[in-house]
Image (cartoon, helix red, strand yellow):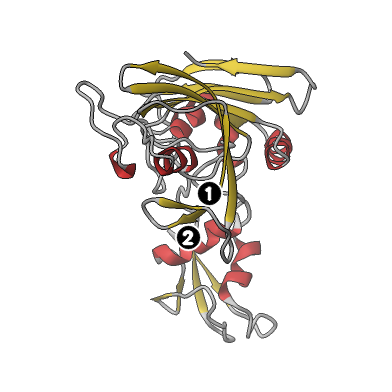
Amino acid sequence: MARVHIVGAAEAGERLDHFLRPHLPGLSRAGVLALVRQGTIRVNGRSAKKGQALHEADVIELPEQPPTLGPAPDPTLALRVLYEDAWLVVVDKPAAVPSHALRPGETGTVTSMLLHRYPEMATVGVGHRQLEPGILHRLDTDTSGVLLAARDATTFAALRELSEQGGIEKRYLALCKGQVHAPQLLAAYLRADQKRVRVEATPFARAKPIETELLSCELLGELSLVEVRVRFAARHQIRAQLAALGHPIAADTLYGGAELPGLRRHFLHASSLCFAHPRTGESLHIAAE
């Protein structure tokens, strides 16, 4: 059921997306634009464009209740909670479970489980990313381990600031080809495309500098089990840097890792997080086997 608004003289000339914000309270700008792209908002009976100018007497059809733009709660997915309090939660993400939804209403993700258990998270950080309420960092679908989320907007903002300042230390375990020299610091620049990233030694326009610290290495036959530390982790950073070093992660076929019998995903595990609690000041070290 739609509700109808007739554009008045004072509103004529206004862009549709600017007009919609006060008429759809509770939705972020990204949420409003999603409704326009989906064709939910209609002007004079036709699908609208976000930047089109309105004219006096235009008839705008608005949803009575905007459809769900974020992930849907999922009671069927059980995740191990490593730490929780009134402000934040840390879970152990299994391999093969996506961190967040790609489409509105999607289930089977970490965010879906979190929304079922902590429904107050539904609007936390949605101005940042509509489909990722509450979560502070992503793990690739096949990467397992520690994932941090905030239960309220104040904590989310504080943790984002802490992360941007390098105040959240993330450690990983990676099983790699060959014998890896450690300790060593890998510094480079990432160039991203839709599916993968490339590591480059010299800066370029809009280059994203990255650092990946290899802390230790245990040689296991023709493979190495490497402990990795990062403070700022870009998409595929660890996977791409180890591959560029000549040591792709086992079974990471996207970056040249060899398949191994019985291993159905790349062997990368987010083993721990270390940070100061933004609300209590307590030093937290949270690990997943």
Separation of disc 2 and disc 1 at Cα? 9 Å
Residue 282 image offset from top left, x and y in percent: 77, 18
**245 left or right of 163 in image:** left
- Residue at 39% from the left image edge and 24% from the top image edge: 94
Residue 254 is situated, as x and y percent measured from the top left of the image, at 31, 44
Please tell me whether mark 1 sits on a helix, a strand or a loop.
loop
Give the vertical position of 143 relative to 45 (above or below).
Answer: above
The quarter in which the N terminus is drawn is: bottom left
Q: Position of residue 184 (x, y in %)?
A: 57, 31
Q: Amino acid at mark 2?
A: Ala
Q: Nearer the viewer, residue 175 or 26?
A: 175
Instruction: Identify the image quadrant of residue 11.
Output: bottom right
Q: Is residue 9 left or right of residue 40?
A: right
State the SS at label 2.
helix
Mark 2 Cα shell of 10 Å, populated few (<14), some (14-19), many (≥20) = some
Horizontal side of residue 61 vs 13, given as left or right: left
The residue lying furthest to the left in this view is 261
Whether residue 84 is visible = no
Residue drawn at x 51%, y 63% is 33
Which residue position is annotated with label 2? 34
Amino acid on which disc 1 is placed? Gln
The image quarter containing residue 73 is: top left
Nearer to me, 245 or 17 = 245
Dot 2 or dot 1: first in sequence order is 2
Q: Is residue 37 above or below residue 256?
A: below
Contact, CB < 8 Å: mark 2 with mark 1?
yes
**Whole-percent x, y for residue 206 in the image:** 59, 63
Q: Quadrant of residue 244?
A: top left
Q: In this view of the protein, which residue sits in the foreground, 241 or 132?
A: 241
The residue under label 1 is 130
259 vs 281: above or below? below
